[in-house]
Image (spheres, rainbow, N blue to C red):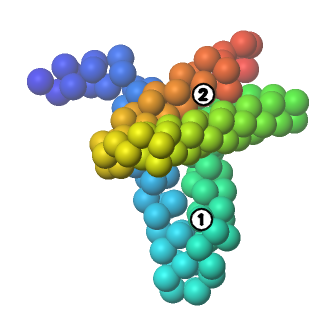
Amino acid sequence: MFKTIKALFVKYRSPILYVFFGGCTTLINWAAYYLLYSVAGVRNVPSTVIAWILAVAFAFITNKLWVFDSRAFDKKTLLREIWTFTAARLATGVLDVVVMYFAVDVFALNANVWKLLSNVVVIVLNYVFSKLIVFKRTGPER
């Protein structure tokens, strides 16, 4: 039984770690927002932006080191990874806003259902972008 579980983990290591660290990223985002907005009294938008930045930074580090096992730390590669990771997260964030705007504000559909559907698409796209673009394996350093 343990061998089977271990074999499944080895086979699906990247998606399993992606889901785990994604959950941790979400907790960091929520906790940072709560501490800034509810405890420290920082206004809503700055609290949201700071929480997003902290969450994306955490996600970048965990995705680079553990999910996609990127061991390239030369300046050129690191800057490319940071830029493409952040750009992908911004793009999927904009996609989320656009989907929610049209689904809820334009077509008056169920906000909770569409938020779930939108998040599923965003999570899958973030994984695909990270695997195929951001942390793509190109050299022996990985």
Q: Residue at x 62, y 49 (%)?
A: 56
In terms of image quadrants, where is residue 126?
Answer: top right
Q: Which residue is mark 2?
A: 130
Camera-side residue of 117 and 84: 117
Camera-side residue of 115 and 126: 115
Proximity of marks 2 and 1: CB atoms separated by less than 8 Å: no
Looking at the image, residue 130 sits to the left or right of residue 14; the answer is right
Tag shown at residue 48:
1
| Amino acid residing under circle 1 | Thr
- Label 1: how many residues lie within 10 Å, few (<14), some (14-19) or many (20+)? some
User: Residue 58, position in %: x, y?
Assistant: 59, 51
Residue 102 higher or lower than 71, as above or below: below
Camera-side residue of 44 and 139: 44
Residue 106 higher or lower than 31, as above or below: above
In terms of image quadrants, where is residue 65?
Answer: top right
Looking at the image, residue 84 sits to the left or right of residue 100; the answer is right
- Name the N-terminal-most of marks 2 and 1: 1
User: Residue 85, position in %: x, y?
Assistant: 68, 35
| Amino acid residing under circle 2 | Ser
Tag shown at residue 113:
none
Q: Residue at x 65, y 65 (%)?
A: 50
Looking at the image, is mark 2 or mark 1 nearer the viewer? 1
Q: CA distance from mark 2 to mark 1?
A: 23 Å
User: Residue 125, position in %: x, y?
Assistant: 52, 27
Kindly tell me whether residue 8 is visible in this rendering.
yes
